């Protein structure tokens, strides 16, 4: 997981503020905040500035900005945002706050109502999403949400063959160069798919009968990872860890059925090194959830 040097800086920051060590304290000390994507909340920002990240580290946001036209699984609920209240300008200088224009809110805040499926945008799949005995999203251990990330790049092959999958051979080839996969890691497939968001229809890449042609994990490779390597999660830059054309969803069944989680629709994987980075998954915590939109941040 995190290096001893990083954890030392985290705990020193917490002790200076005389707070108990908690999930919120750790996140604040790292200088990043988990996103509770399905909750509506109000409040004021802390007057105490967050501690700086580890000296010399590079922070990478692996999260796509969620918009109303962000691609979703065919047939799924698209993201919707309805404005409930806004703060109108009084005609003063740019950025001044004035009277509230509201739709029944009665509050003095800018406020929106969100509607979306749990598996929208950059999101997490809890084990319960594909396993009747799996845990729901709020029960994923915090220790499993801040872990090493190993990135396996199949982007050149995916550009030539949209239906390609990440195989056991790809994993072994990666280990030949970079060594054994880190203990308790998230293994991410980088197919270069995030670059397709700017082209209408290219991200889901559906054919004439609606079948998607997108890369994913070979179920056999996932079985290898959960049985013979110590991983906590899988990640992909497509809408699914399964190939788009799959009808059996073997990657989901093998990973989530083994108690692992998945993070899908990741961004900027190509900016990470194959090994040596750490990732934090800002997972939602709504009780009984099968997953949900999340903020994913890596540093190296």
Image (cartoon, helix red, strand yellow):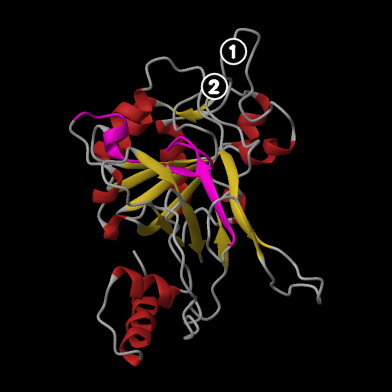
Percent position of residue 219, x then y: 37, 26
Q: Nearer the viewer, residue 46 or 166?
A: 46
Q: Residues within 10 Å of mark 2 (few under 14, many from 20)?
A: few
Residue at coordinates 34% horizontally, 82% vertically from top-left? 8
Q: Which residue is mark 2?
A: 74
Percent position of residue 210, x then y: 59, 13
Q: Tag 2, which secondary structure? A: loop
Residue at coordinates 76% horizontally, 71% vertically from top-left? 90
Labels 2 & 1 near each other (Cβ < 8 A): yes
Q: Which quarter of the picture shows residue 154?
A: top right
Q: Which mark is residue 168?
A: none
Q: Nearer the viewer, residue 47 or 209?
A: 47
Residue furthest to the left in view is: 133
Q: Is residue 83 above or below residue 236?
A: below
Residue range of the region highlighted in magenta in the rendering? 110-132
Q: Is residue 118 magenta?
A: yes
Q: Which residue is mark 1?
A: 210
Question: 211 left or right of 220?
Answer: right
Earlier residue among tags 2 and 1: 2
Residue 3 visible in the picture: no
């Amino acid at each position: 997981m995190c290096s001893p040097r990083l954890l030392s800086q985290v705990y020193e920051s917490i002790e200076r503020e005389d707070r108990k060590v908690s999930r919120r304290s750790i996140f604040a000390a790292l200088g990043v905040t988990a996103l509770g994507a399905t909750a509506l909340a109000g409040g004021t920002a802390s007057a105490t500035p967050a501690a700086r990240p580890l000296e010399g580290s590079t922070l990478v946001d692996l999260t796509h900005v969620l918009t109303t036209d962000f691609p979703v699984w065919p047939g799924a609920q698209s993201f919707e945002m309805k404005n409930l209240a806004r703060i109108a300008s009084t005609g003063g200088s740019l950025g001044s706050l004035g009277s509230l224009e509201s739709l029944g809110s009665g509050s003095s805040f800018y406020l929106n109502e969100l509607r979306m499926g749990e598996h929208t945008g950059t999101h997490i799949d809890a084990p319960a999403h594909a396993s009747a005995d799996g845990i729901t999203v709020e029960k994923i251990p915090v220790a499993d949400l801040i872990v090493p990330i190993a990135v396996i790049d199949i982007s050149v092959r995916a550009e030539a063959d949209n239906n390609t999958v990440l195989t056991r051979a790809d994993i072994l080839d990666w280990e030949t160069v970079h060594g054994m996969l880190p203990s308790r890691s998230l293994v991410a497939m980088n197919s270069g798919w995030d670059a397709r968001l700017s082209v209408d229809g290219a991200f889901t890449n559906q054919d004439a009968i609606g079948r998607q042609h997108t890369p994913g994990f070979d179920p056999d490779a996932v079985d290898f990872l959960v049985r013979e390597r110590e991983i906590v999660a899988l990640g992909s830059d497509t809408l699914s860890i399964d190939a788009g054309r799959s009808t059996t969803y073997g990657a989901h069944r093998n990973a989530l059925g083994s108690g692992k989680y998945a993070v899908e629709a990741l961004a900027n994987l190509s900016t990470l090194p194959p090994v040596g980075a750490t990732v934090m998954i800002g997972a939602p915590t709504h009780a009984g959830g099968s997953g949900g939109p999340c903020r994913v941040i890596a540093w190296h």
